[in-house]
Image (cartoon, rainbow, N blue to C red):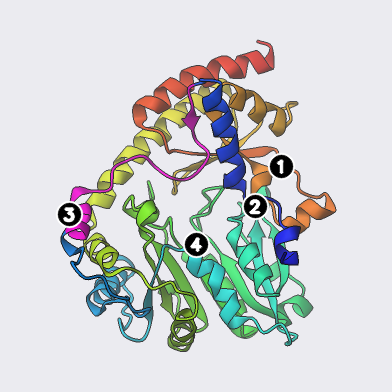
């Protein structure tokens, strides 16, 4: 067995699925705020486009994807960020963002070189670390701190580390905290990466789920040594369709495209038709945001009422919630789970290296606004009772 696989703990969502199965067996009603997979239906016009595109004879798609999809993506980037990218040189489709993020270091990390470090923040989406490890990179997780507003601060990293760094991952709006950044932050990190010839990878799959200011893209700062990863999973309710794109530096994109043929990740053309109409339309996204805002506002009122601290969510559909003072997060989350409230403990988002050295300790947990509005209301009633039981009130 691959030693890298042996060294990894189970994927966090696998553990949540095990817990949910146990609750089902006990016939406890589940309110699933664990996995970020919203229940809102995929808009009809997207499903219709996919259905109409299913061919009588199915043949292999290409990694480059259909040009009309790449044009639709290029138009979206221009419309949303004011940046003009070539559909032929700067953009390739992907099967969601996860596979593209995982495979990226396999192409650009050379284990025989000194410059093989991958930097990412922690807490984080686990795939930044896992993709780097499978590519035999050296990983350098940076602890994202509440006092820094959970921003990855490259300006605090020793120069000797930056000189050895090949890839830096950022993810804003951020999973799991919901933190956002401004253009000034992006400019600073862009400048540092270019100074040290580092590929700056920006996971932007939540960039269209915002409640206040529009979050900026790294593409608005520049494309030199820059790659942005986008997905329709959250934007358009297409988690099961597996569709997204990668865009940025022409040389990097063309190199990545060349080697992606080895991975077997070409997107089926009927899925591409659904993706095309999804990227062309913004109205369905606005409707989805309205629903997520209803859920968000319910929990803001609830958390404020019972005195739970949290990072105010300007974007994403996540809350990063702090366990009550004097109650360990594991204990609080365990009690919620026993009553059918499924959430993700903060330690699920720690880097593996932190777990090994015992530094993975979190007083936070994440909730994903996945259940329907009505289910959220029901869950709040259950949660409030559990909360006061734990506190002994």
To which residue does mark 4 refer?
A: 98
Going by the image, does 265 lie left or right of 128? left
To which residue does mark 3 refer?
A: 48
Q: Start and end of the magenta stretch?
A: 29-51
Q: Count residues near mark 4 (Cα–Cα under 10 Å), then give few for <14, some for 14-19, many for 20+.
A: many
Disc 2 vs disc 4: which is toward the camera?
Answer: 4
Q: Secondary structure at mark 3?
A: helix
In front of the other: 255 or 390:
255
In front of the other: 325 or 34:
34
**Mark 1 or mark 4: whose residue is earlier in sequence:** 4
Q: Position of residue 137 (x, y in %)?
A: 70, 75
**Mark 3 or mark 2: whose residue is earlier in sequence:** 3
- Give the alpha-carbon distance from disc 2 to disc 1, as whole Å: 9 Å
**Mark 4 or mark 3: whose residue is earlier in sequence:** 3
For the residues bearing labels 2 and 1, Cβ distance under 8 angstroms? yes
Q: Position of residue 253 (x, y in %)?
A: 45, 83
Q: Secondary structure at mark 2?
A: loop
- Give the alpha-carbon distance from disc 1 to disc 3, as whole Å: 44 Å
Disc 3 vs disc 2: which is toward the camera?
Answer: 3
- Give the alpha-carbon distance from disc 1 to disc 4, as whole Å: 25 Å
Q: Secondary structure at mark 4?
A: helix
Q: Position of residue 102 (x, y in %)?
A: 55, 67
Q: Residue at x 24, y 71 (%)?
A: 72
Q: Residue at x 65, y 74 (%)?
A: 135
Tell me, for residue 123, which label it has, or none: 2
Disc 1 vs disc 4: which is toward the camera?
Answer: 4
For the residues bearing labels 2 and 4, Cβ distance under 8 angstroms? no
Q: Count residues near mark 3 (Cα–Cα under 10 Å), then give few for <14, some for 14-19, many for 20+.
A: few
Q: Residue at x 68, y 68 (%)?
A: 133
Going by the image, does 55 lie left or right of 171? left
């Amino acid at each position: 067995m691959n030693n890298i696989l042996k060294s990894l703990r189970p994927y966090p969502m696998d553990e949540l699925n095990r817990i949910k199965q146990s609750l089902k067996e006990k016939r406890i009603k589940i309110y699933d705020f664990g996995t970020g997979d919203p229940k809102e239906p995929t808009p009809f016009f997207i499903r219709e486009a996919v259905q109409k595109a299913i061919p009588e004879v199915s043949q292999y798609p290409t990694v480059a994807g259909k040009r009309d999809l790449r044009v639709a993506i290029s138009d979206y980037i221009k419309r949303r960020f004011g940046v003009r990218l070539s559909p032929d040189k700067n953009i390739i489709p992907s099967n969601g963002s996860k596979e593209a993020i995982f495979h990226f270091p396999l192409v650009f990390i050379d284990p025989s070189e000194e410059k093989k470090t991958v930097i990412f923040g922690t807490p984080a989406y686990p795939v930044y670390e896992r993709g780097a490890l499978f590519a035999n990179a050296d990983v350098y997780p940076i602890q994202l701190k509440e006092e820094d507003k959970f921003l990855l601060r490259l300006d605090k990293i020793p120069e000797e580390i930056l000189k050895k760094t090949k890839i830096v991952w950022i993810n804003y709006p951020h999973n799991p905290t919901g933190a956002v950044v401004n253009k000034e932050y992006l400019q600073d990190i862009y400048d540092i990466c270019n100074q040290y010839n580092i590929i700056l990878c920006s996971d932007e799959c939540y960039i269209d789920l915002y409640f206040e200011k529009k979050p900026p893209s790294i593409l608005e700062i520049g494309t030199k040594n820059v790659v942005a990863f986008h997905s329709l999973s959250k934007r358009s309710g297409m988690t099961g369709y597996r569709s997204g794109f990668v865009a940025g530096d022409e040389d990097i994109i063309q190199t990545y495209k060349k080697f992606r043929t080895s991975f077997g990740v070409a997107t089926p053309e009927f899925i591409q038709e659904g993706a095309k109409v999804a990227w062309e339309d913004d109205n369905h996204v606005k409707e989805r945001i309205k629903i997520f805002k209803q859920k968000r506002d319910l929990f803001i009122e609830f958390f404020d009422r019972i005195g739970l601290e949290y990072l105010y969510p300007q974007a994403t559909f996540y809350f990063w919630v702090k366990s009550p003072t004097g109650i360990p997060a594991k204990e609080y989350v365990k009690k919620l789970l026993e009553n059918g409230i499924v959430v993700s403990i903060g330690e699920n988002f720690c880097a593996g290296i932190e777990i090994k050295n015992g530094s993975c300790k979190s007083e936070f947990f994440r909730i994903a606004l996945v259940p329907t509005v009505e289910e959220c209301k029901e869950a709040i009633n259950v949660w409030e009772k559990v909360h006061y039981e734990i506190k002994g009130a």
